[in-house]
Amino acid sequence: MNGVMKHSLTENGDALPSNLGPREKKRKEGWNVSSSLESKGAVNNVRLSEEKYFKEVLEKRDQSKELIKLSIGDPAVFGNLPAHPVAIESLKAAVDTGSYNGYGHSKGLPHVRKAVAEKFSVINQAPLTAEDVIMTSSCSGALEYAISVLANAGQNILSPKPGFALYDCLTGAKQVEIRHYALKPDQNWEADISDMERLVDDNTAAIIINNPSNPCGSVFSKEHVKELADFAARHYLPVISDEIYAEMVFPGSSFHSIASVSTKVPALVCGGLSKQYMIPGWRLGWILIHDPVDAFKDEVRDGFTNIVMKTLGPSTVVQAAVPGIIQNVPADYHERNISILQMNAELVYDGLLKAPGLNPIMPSGAMYLMVGIDINEFPEFNNDIDFTKQLVLEQSVFCLPGDVFKFPNFFRIVLIMPGEKIVEAVQRITQFCIKHHHISS
């Protein structure tokens, strides 16, 4: 060995004493494969609710009654809110070209990003360009990208309560603390700014705003959106604005994007095709980067360039259909769908106003309605979970409890069913309340 003795090295690169051999490795004695912290934190209570709360009662429910599921906001389920033929033909045309069978740019097809930028540019502000648009696999994918780019493990994000359960799922997966700020049911579900002030600190990475709201069906006024923007600017917080229900508002209300009311706050606006165009299964969304103060120019834009490499972009063939859809689906299609949702909301609201112990709150848009439960007037039940489980068992009506949305003693009704099913569901809920309602003397 040329007179040179070889030594094993320590972890620091130092030579071990010559009388010691390499460190012995501890040998595993059996299979012990653990799941990651990310998977343990990725809990979506809306999707797990059927297994978590309702599996047993769904099996034991009164089978003589058809199950009416008012639980999941999928507008394609019942066939009464179909996709517009323009959307179908746009997708068929993209397939028929044969040009979209390969990979696209990881941020999305350039001409599609340009079309989205032109569609959603804000009047009287600098227009968006293709560089301000990132195509994603659904709005859920947009939210995941936004949270992943803005927040590190150990930081916190402010999120509405009640709120979309996916926010907790995505932050939990990233080991990001979620701090829930209250919405006020007696004030059209406006955010409690004082509660937000209590929660924010130097470790807050962003604030999530959901307008129009799931689960509340609320639509913020222009003045309140400005209040939220002013709060974000005051604390130098970027906004993640979930606007998947943009423009899905009932007559008498108006939608105002965060980007349209403030030039002081950077915002990642998340949207997509699923709800306005009634095609959630197509899984196509986007992020619009609104940055009037150049807060994102140094790191965040580069962060998106990196993080999209994880998935290499959404389906190219569905992307290729986007320009035709957002440019050519006529306004009366959206008006018809909104009319159906509003009619269903009025049926539920008017009907449940007469149910003892319930306090429905009329929505202004989206496809949901929240109902308060005077739980003390239902002595058989401890909480909204007990109430909704028994409702399934006796009446075969499945609504999600407010607990799923971090807002106890409420339940949410999805408004997408045909009107006759909505009427039947309201009748069954009313019968259930009459049976179990009791005010102590």
Image (tube, rainbow, N blue to C red):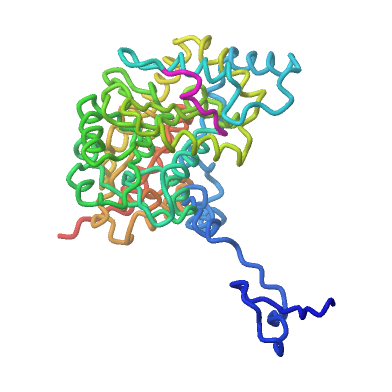
The residue closer to the viewer here, 223 or 11, is 11
The residue closer to the viewer here, 402 or 224, is 224
The answer to whether 226 is drawn above or below residue 39 in the figure is above
Residue 169 as seen in the image, left or right of residue 26: left
The location of residue 146, given as percent across then percent down, is 45, 39
Quadrant in the picture for the N terminus:
bottom right
Residue 32 as seen in the image, left or right of residue 123: right
In reply to whether residue 384 is colored magenta, the answer given is: no
The answer to whether 414 is drawn above or below residue 290 in the figure is below
Residue 243 as seen in the image, left or right of residue 116: left
Q: Which residue is at 30% across, 32% downward? A: 218
The answer to whether 321 is drawn above or below residue 377 in the figure is above
The residue sitting at the bottom extreme is: 19
The residue sitting at the right extreme is: 1
Residue 192 as seen in the image, left or right of residue 295: left
Q: Which residue is at 49% across, 36% downward? A: 302
Asked if residue 373 can be seen in this view, the reply is: yes
The location of residue 3, given as percent across then percent down, is 81, 80
The residue closer to the viewer here, 158 or 295, is 295
The residue sitting at the left extreme is: 441
Dividing the picture into quarters, in which one does residue 183 lie?
A: top left
Magenta span covers which residues? 128-137
In reply to whether residue 133 is colored magenta, the answer given is: yes
Q: Which residue is at 28% across, 49% downward? A: 373
